[in-house]
Amino acid sequence: MSVTLHVVRHGEAASSWDKDPDPGLSELGHQQAEQAFQKIQAMTGGPRKLISSPLKRAQETASPFQVSWKRTIEIVPAIAEIPSAHVPFSGRRAWLSEIMKGSWSEQEEVLLRWRQRIIDYLSSQIEDAVLFSHFMVINALVGELEQKDQILVFKPDNGSITSISVSDGQLSLIERGREAITVVS
């Protein structure tokens, strides 16, 4: 049996990642969430399981789906943004820029475990679902599926939809989401 997972990158955040630990969406971000809903509604024809990162911007991106489909959102820490609690706010942007220039083979164990939790969680899915997550999560996932060692493999735009298939616990990429020059937030 094969299931399809649509991974939506959250809409534009109201504040940058290095200024607010958990910003909600900007007005544009809410519009992007609605556009993602309309696109997935047209692709799927109706309700799917909803899974979100615990971060506010991801949950707010899921809101149009929750309201229209009358579904609860399952909150899953495994698809939260890259762990950075050890980095002061003022240094987060520089830290992340350095990480994105690198490869997985040179990363600390904590980041390798984070990536593996993403893969393990998605591999365990047994029903079609829409997931609401983050730039780095989607990069970790796509890099793994394309068997690339570099961390930054593409730049999923806010509200973009990356589709993957799960068959017998094996993940495969159906389609990358829309790519754009974007600020990580």
Image (cartoon, helix red, strand yellow):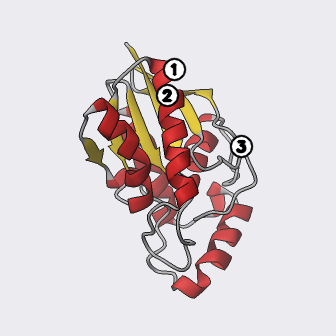
Percent across and percent down for residue 142 are 61, 40
Rendered-image quadrant of the N terminus: top left
Residue at x-position 38% and y-position 21%: 46
Q: How many marks?
A: 3
Q: Nearer the viewer, residue 113 or 92?
A: 92
Q: Nearer the viewer, residue 15 or 167?
A: 15
Q: Amino acid at mark 3?
A: Glu
> In the drawing, does residue 25 fall left or right of residue 51?
right
Percent across and percent down for residue 71 are 25, 35
Residue at x-position 57% and y-position 45%: 159
Mark 1 residue element: helix
Residue at x-position 67% and y-position 78%: 94
Say which mark, if any, is on residue 43. 1
Residue at x-position 54% and y-position 72%: 15
How far apart are the alpha carbons under marks 1 and 2? 5 Å
Circles 1 and 2: CB atoms closer than 8 Å: yes
Query: In this orientation, does residue 87 appear?
Result: yes
Q: Amino acid at mark 2?
A: Ile
The quadrant in which residue 45 appears is top left
How far apart are the alpha carbons under marks 1 and 3? 19 Å
Residue corresponding to mark 3: 179
Circles 1 and 3: CB atoms closer than 8 Å: no
Say which mark, if any, is on residue 40. 2
Closer to the observer: label 3 or label 2?
2
Q: Nearer the viewer, residue 59 or 28?
A: 28
Q: Amino acid at mark 1?
A: Met
Query: Is the residue 57 above or below the residue 118 in the image?
Result: below
Crowd band around label 2 with a 10 angstrom C-alpha radius: few (<14), some (14–19), many (20+): some
Q: Sequence-wise, which precedes: disc 3 or disc 2?
A: 2
Closer to the observer: label 1 or label 3?
1
